[in-house]
Image (spheres, grey):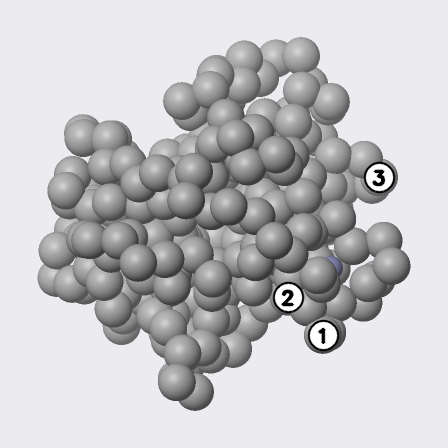
Amino acid sequence: MTAATCPFPRTCPVPDPARLDLRTLRTVSVPEQRTHYSVYSIAHDKSLFKDSGAGDTRFSPLFEMGRPVPTLYVANARTAALLETAFHEVQPTGVAVISRATDLNGKGLRVLDIPADTRVIDLRDNRLGDLGISRSQLVATSAAHYPCTREWAARLRQLARQPRAAGLLWRSRVAEIASRRSALFADLQQTDYAEVMVLFGDRLGPSSIDATVEFRDLSSPGVADIIESIADELGATIV
Ligand SMILES: [Zn+2]
């Protein structure tokens, strides 16, 4: 199945979640003492979670009973946080371009401390293998298929399980992009690094996450060095 709005239904790689036995999936706790990063919109910096119902990302926006589910993307590396949000058009092949005006302007970066008792559904590579699907069918699709991957998030939220999962965990595309573009990127190719989560605010109190702003404006000259090094890692050009 593909989403009704999938632009390429005949070649859509995303399978119908209703046709797979999702009971093989497990929840895991967020690793303790791990720093997490999150890109945020400066215009909406009052709340951690995004609940406007706007946007077009892999697992958000989601709607239940006609209301948007509050969501927050976090990653355990800055590069992964940026790649899954601001740089989500950067693909393993093709020309990688990061636009200062549209990808960086108006965005900041926060450091987050997430409670260790937060439980998320494990969609890392081995668990996807248990389901009989590959990364490229769910967590590493192109942005065109985000309507289809959002159908998975909606279904996974419905899985009856106590306590109910507060999010989804997967491995970022950082490693595959980096390994194709740079041989000097070993740290992000380790399996426990560059993991990404989407957290659901209605299943996790916002006060339970401790957040500090690391960079207030990603397009400012003061952050240029780190943005350029991340672009280098991804083999991307900043315009
Ligand atoms: Zn699709």
Pick whichever, 181 or 103, lies toward us: 181
Q: Is mark 3 within 8 Å of ligand 1?
A: no
Q: Earlier in the sequence, mark 3 or mark 1?
A: 1
- Which labelled disc corresponds to residue 147? 2
Which is more foreground, mark 2 or mark 3?
A: 2
Q: Which residue is mark 1?
A: 4
Residue sitting at x 65%, y 27%: 176
At 54% from the left and 18% from the top, the residue drawn is 189
In the image, farthest residue toward the bottom: 66
Considering only order in the chain, which callout, 3 or 2, is on the residue closer to the N terminus?
Answer: 3
Asked if the residue at tag 1 contacts the one at tag 2, i.e. Cβ–Cβ closer than 8 Å, the answer is: yes
SS label for mark 3: loop
Label 2 – label 1 distance at C-alpha: 8 Å
Reading the chain from its start, which is encountered first: label 2 or label 1? 1
Amino acid type assigned to the residue bearing label 3 in the image: Gly
Amino acid, disc 2: Pro
Residue found at x 48% / y 32%: 127
Give the label, 2 or 1, closer to the camera.
1
Depicted 77 relative to depicted 56: above or below: above
Q: CA distance from mark 2 to mark 3?
A: 22 Å
Number of marks in the rendered image: 3
Q: Which mark is residue 94?
A: 3
Q: Point out residue 175 in the picture as x, y percentages from the top left corner.
A: 59, 26
Q: Position of residue 180 (x, y in %)?
A: 73, 22
SS assignment at label 1? loop
Please tell me which residue lies in front, 77 or 167.
167
> Of the residues shown, which amino acid type is indicated by label 1?
Ala
Residue 16 relative to residue 68: left or right = right
